Amino acid sequence: MTAGTTVTTTVPPDMAAWPPLDEDKRSAGQQLLHWAADGVGPRLCLVRGAGGSGKSGLLAWLLAGTVGRPGLTIHATVPSEGLTTETFAWELGRQLGYGALSPDRLLDRVGADERPLLLLVPDLHRAGAGPADLPSAAPEPLVAELLEPLLALPHLRAAVEVGTSALLATHSGATVVDLGEGDGRDTGRASYADHAAAVPRTADDRPDWSRAPAPVRRRILDAALRTDGQETAVRGLLTDPGFLVHGSAAALTATLADERIPVPGRLREVWRLAAPELTAYHADSAERAALLHAAAIGTDPGLAEYLRPLAAQHWWSAEWSRPTLPLTALALVPGEERRLMASDATGRLRTYDAKGGTGAPLTASPRLPDEAAASPSVHPLAVRPRCLAPRDARSALLLDGSDALLPFVAEDDPTTAFALGRIAEHHGAAALSEEESLVTALGGGGARSPYAVVGDRGGTVHVWSLREYHDMPRSHRVHEQPVTAAVCVDTADGLTLTFTAGADGSVRLWEISAEPMPVPVQQRPHRTTALAAADTSVGPVLAVAWSDGGVHLWHVLSGRVRELPWLRSCDALALTPEGLLVIGDAEGLCGVRLRWDGLWEG
């Protein structure tokens, strides 16, 4: 199916199979339903009416009726009250499966999407946030910068609630569903004083934002921007960590975008980093605290300390941050008491302490392979490892950005150099004779004995021992597509599990003494960027990083999956049995503490 393809569905004209609807809304419901089901009519439906006329309720009715019903799919529903162009784009991107994207990148992705898309946009007339003298405080920029370009795409249709405004009125031929007069309710314009008075207080007379009514948390910052004592009111909210955790993330994002507003410390920088995830509807207060703390821990230590007690209540929280050059590869060193080996964008290998709670650097190699510490077996051109499989703290197999498998030995150790060089030569010779054998992924692991897991373009996985010499690896074709990531782990009952990712978005499990599992353990329409695994107190756990920014934690014995939202695209992972997840990304390293006892609860 290509962009621009339309789908015609059949919906019962009397709505007998749809949820109940008040008698005075049935005509409007019938009109909206027929528009949604008609794949060849107008691509825009404007839902009009005064306050309290039931516009949002009608869109909710349409959405509820499609749940579990084949033939009519709402691909995204973005309530627009308080959203700006940027925050609207983030939410729409998340719902369409792209992740939080900027408006320009979102338009590119939707334009390239082959699905015929149907969107619901409630409360467009209430869009906008931030200082009233900025364009972003009104809905018109959202319409001009994002909705109009989206509606120009031939494969996109949208039902948009516009109230009594003239938004999108220039679209001739649009279907108009008009609910007429309502009860005149307008709950969005209470004063700052009224909102503040509705916030409960703690025993020491501080605002208790955790118990504040949801409408107050959503609207009080916008009210503060309108009040006569604006500067004092806004400062009070921005300096209160409780409000940062519980207040409207969309309103905070719009307000902090205004450089004229003074902020404490480096809050603006911290918030900017965390905002795409903070504005996600799934982020509860504990998770928001963990996200903000993770952004602050390497940027604003004072704010991080304020947030630490709140973040510690969540099932994950950042423990340390180690800013460096962008990390390209990361792995635990076998038998070295939780030592990490990492490679940065310059090709330098360094080891870090993953046990002491700080992520402190321990040793560094010269940049590969310009100085004598590099193995003579390494190709004389500059090496930039994108994957590594350590044998110990001084030697490893490396997969270069040019897809060359190379040995690295930091000391004069001919035996190790020969063993690692033999593996590299085996795969190099195979790639010369057959293109499908080109190495595309490399990972390590193994508590009893270190392994290297090599994946190739043909989807075959090869497992080598890095301590015992073997002329040939254990091999099995696990994927139908090229392997993109690999890792292995020894379990307490003597099994060696290998986890690999394919270019088709599948993650598969192979126990090397048996056949691979017949179905993927996960399958997503995204690329896997990194894998890590550990045998923990609750059994084997696999961590998977995806190109849409999510990090999934899979409990192997039960099949349960939990998502850890992260602030940047994750390029490398390592996981200790004690529950320290080390994430490598464009800013360096961050250690995240996982609490096994609460990880899969709820």
Image (cartoon, grey):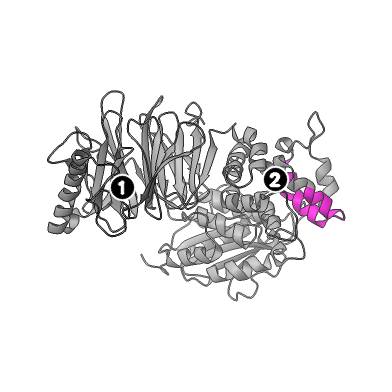
* Type of amino acid under label 1: Ala
Asked which secondary structure carries label 2, the reply is loop
Pointer 2: what residue? Answer: 247
- Which of the two discs, 2 and 1, labels the residue nearer the N terminus? 2
Q: Name the residue under label 1.
A: 373
Q: Is residue 234 magenta?
A: yes
Left or right: where does residue 108 sit relative to residue 385?
right
Q: Which amino acid does label 2 sit on?
A: Gly
User: Would residue 3 be found to the left or right of residue 250 on screen?
Assistant: left
Q: Residue at x 58, y 62 (%)?
A: 159
Specify whether 185 is left or right of 407. right
Magenta span contains residue 525: no
Name the front one of labels 2 and 1.
1
Mark carried by residue 339: none
Residue 393 shows up from this direction = yes
Query: In the rendered image of this protein, does residue 160 appear above or below residue 548?
Result: below
Q: Is the magenta stretch mostly helix, strand or loop?
A: helix
Give the structural element (helix, strand or loop) at label 1: loop
Q: Could you tell me which residue is drawn at 16 percent across and 50 percent down?
A: 425
Could you say where residue 216 lies in the image, as x and y percent from the top left? 75, 45
Residue 188 is situated, as x and y percent measured from the top left of the image, at: 76, 53
Task: Tell me the crowding category of disc 2: few under 14, some 14 to 19, or many 20 or more residues within 10 angstroms, Cα based.
Answer: many
- Which region of the structure is painted magenta? 213-235
Q: Where, by quadrant of the figure, is residue 305 drawn?
A: top right
Q: Give the vertical position of 242 relative to 526 (above or below).
A: above
Q: In this view, does 169 lie above or below 390?
A: below
